[in-house]
């Protein structure tokens, strides 16, 4: 028998009433063909029975019979159309194991039949009740990978002890004492773990995005601070003689270089964060893709490589600190002693800037020498002239008449002021946490002390070689400013609005505490207390030529 002409179009097999491919085609006595349903409904609505195509009139309603040949041709035509609509298998895809001739792309693999099916040959598994119970997964082309190498049976179980896929015979043999579950059950466990990993990776991504915003905000604040600093410097320098033009340029360059360094650091951190985000995003996509697969074996085989997150930095302690420009401006002005009036005016502005870092500190009685008397509010201290019987502890000074504050500082900048009015002897500054509290102490920066002291009408910075400081008038209040990250400790005469001394290039590696020493009572001559005072940031209006 000659094969049907598969090049025929749909028009060759269409009913002239519904214009669709024949469904149960029947023939009239005049030789025309229609769908049984179409011609029956057509005649139901007519008084006379005639052909819808040629209008031949029939005296009685014809007895319709199925056109067997046409039915077979229509069925073959339908199958050829379905085959054309299905994709042929391409390189890297799994072919249908049932197709003969041109193999079509498999869409499912049956774990019961151990066969891959295309859409057409999968149809019985979607229709027949018994076949519907078979477990279908994504198509696979390497069935041997899913077979037990020892027993040649399908790996359909999972050993939770050894974390490997096993077959039924393995469970009864080497793994008989291990907890063994179906792949589906372990698949659910691993899927839940993947969901948790995906969530954790998502959180890591969000944390890094927040860190990027934090760094960018810091850079923005640094830029604004730099702009203000440059503006202040310009205000100072525009009134100076042409001889100091070079100094102005050098100062601006220093500010810009510090800002550039900060921006460079920030850019490096942002680049590293974005790299981690990219890696984490890729990992999240892999995890998400794996968590949605229906292939139990593939998930379990791949899970161990995705379980542990990639190596990333702990960003909780990473930050970009805005650069400090205060010390740079002061050091530059120190070189211009011949312009004393402008220096004074500028240093007044510097003091105003450092005062914005004011901190509220109170004295710690547990550190005070037994001779010292502290006020109830913790802001005043003086020598009472009598040593009290106090319990000793590792924090208390036993020789020097010193006291620390309760508060300490491990980063950033801070400023406080101490009233020294009517005092003949005193010491104040900052000290690191690990200083010794017992016996005679050597007070130098090397040993953890950055202090100035007043005695015999002389003001001195304590170092290996004492630094004698200029004393313009009787000191009434001293300001102490510390930039922990810059390694700077500065002292100011608050009433005169001038800088006294700065220790630069300091190295701080532990908490710093403000430290006070009111000096000995001296029969009442030095009875006035040292007082930690609130900062009074009033506007100063100095005449241009004030000295």
Image (cartoon, grey):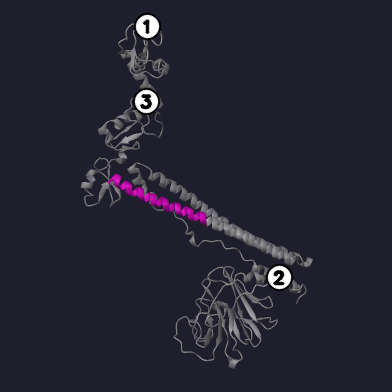
Q: Earlier in the sequence, mark 3 or mark 2?
A: 3
For residue 317, above or below residue 468: above
Q: Which mark is residue 346?
A: 2
At x 63%, y 59%, the residue is: 223
Q: Find out whether residue 547 is within the magenta segment.
A: no
| Residue wearing tag 1 | 57
For residue 338, above or below residue 258: below
Stretch of the chain drawn in magenta = 182-210
User: Regarding mark 2 in the picture, which secondary structure is present there?
Assistant: helix
User: Regarding mark 3 in the picture, which secondary structure is present there?
Assistant: loop
Q: Which mark is residue 102?
A: 3
Q: CA distance from mark 2 to mark 1?
A: 118 Å
Q: Can I make out residue 273 in this image?
A: yes
Q: Position of residue 495 (x, y in %)?
A: 67, 78
- Mark toward the viewer: 2 or 1: 1
Q: Earlier in the sequence, mark 2 or mark 1?
A: 1
């Amino acid at each position: 028998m000659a094969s049907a002409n598969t090049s025929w179009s749909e028009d060759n097999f269409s009913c002239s009433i519904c214009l669709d491919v024949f469904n149960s085609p029947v023939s009239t006595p005049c030789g025309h063909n229609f769908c049984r349903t179409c011609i029956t409904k057509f005649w139901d609505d007519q008084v006379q029975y005639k052909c819808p195509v040629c209008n031949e009139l029939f005296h009685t309603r014809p007895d319709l019979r199925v056109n067997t040949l046409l039915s077979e041709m229509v069925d073959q035509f339908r199958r050829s159309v379905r085959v054309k609509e299905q994709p042929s298998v391409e390189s890297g895809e799994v072919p249908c194991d049932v197709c003969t001739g041109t193999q079509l792309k498999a869409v499912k693999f049956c774990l019961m039949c151990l066969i891959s099916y295309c859409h057409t040959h999968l149809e019985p598994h979607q229709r027949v009740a018994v076949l519907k119970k078979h477990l279908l997964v994504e198509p696979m082309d390497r069935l041997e990978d899913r077979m037990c190498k020892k027993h040649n049976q399908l790996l359909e179980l999972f050993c939770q002890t050894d974390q490997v896929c096993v077959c039924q015979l393995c469970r009864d043999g080497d793994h008989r004492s291990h907890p063994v579950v179906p792949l589906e059950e372990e698949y659910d466990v691993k899927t839940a773990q993947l969901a948790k990993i995906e969530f954790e990776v998502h959180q890591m991504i969000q944390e890094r995005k927040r860190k990027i915003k934090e760094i960018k905000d810091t850079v923005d604040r640094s830029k604004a601070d730099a702009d203000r600093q440059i503006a202040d410097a310009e205000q100072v320098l525009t009134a100076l003689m042409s001889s100091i033009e070079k100094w102005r340029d050098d100062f601006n360059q220093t500010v810009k270089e510090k800002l550039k360094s900060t921006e460079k650091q920030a850019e490096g951190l942002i680049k590293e964060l974005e790299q981690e985000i990219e890696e984490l995003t890729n990992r999240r996509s892999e995890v998400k893709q794996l968590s949605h697969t229906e292939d139990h074996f593939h998930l379990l085989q791949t899970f161990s490589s995705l379980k542990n997150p990639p190596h990333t930095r702990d960003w909780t302690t990473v930050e970009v600190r805005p650069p400090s420009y205060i010390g740079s401006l002061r050091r530059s002005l120190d070189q211009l002693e011949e312009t004393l009036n402008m220096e004074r005016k500028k240093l007044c502005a510097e003091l105003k800037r450092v005062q914005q870092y004011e901190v509220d500190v109170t004295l710690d009685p547990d550190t005070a020498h037994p001779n010292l008397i502290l006020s109830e509010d913790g802001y005043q201290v003086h020598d009472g002239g009598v040593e009290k019987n106090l319990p000793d502890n590792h924090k208390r000074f036993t020789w020097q008449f010193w006291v620390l504050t309760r508060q300490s500082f491990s980063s950033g900048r801070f400023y406080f002021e101490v009233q020294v009015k009517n005092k003949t002897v005193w010491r104040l500054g900052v000290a690191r946490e690990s200083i010794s509290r017992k016996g005679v102490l050597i007070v130098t920066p090397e040993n953890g002390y950055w202090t100035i002291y007043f005695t015999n009408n002389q003001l001195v910075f304590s170092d290996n070689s004492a630094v004698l400081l200029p004393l313009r008038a009787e000191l009434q209040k001293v300001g102490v400013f510390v930039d922990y990250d810059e390694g700077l400790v500065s002292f100011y005469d608050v009433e005169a609005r001038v800088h006294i001394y700065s220790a630069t290039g300091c190295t701080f590696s532990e908490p710093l505490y403000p430290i006070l020493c009111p000096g000995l009572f001296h029969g009442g001559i030095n009875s006035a207390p040292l007082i930690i005072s609130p900062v009074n940031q009033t506007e100063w209006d100095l005449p241009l030529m004030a000295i």
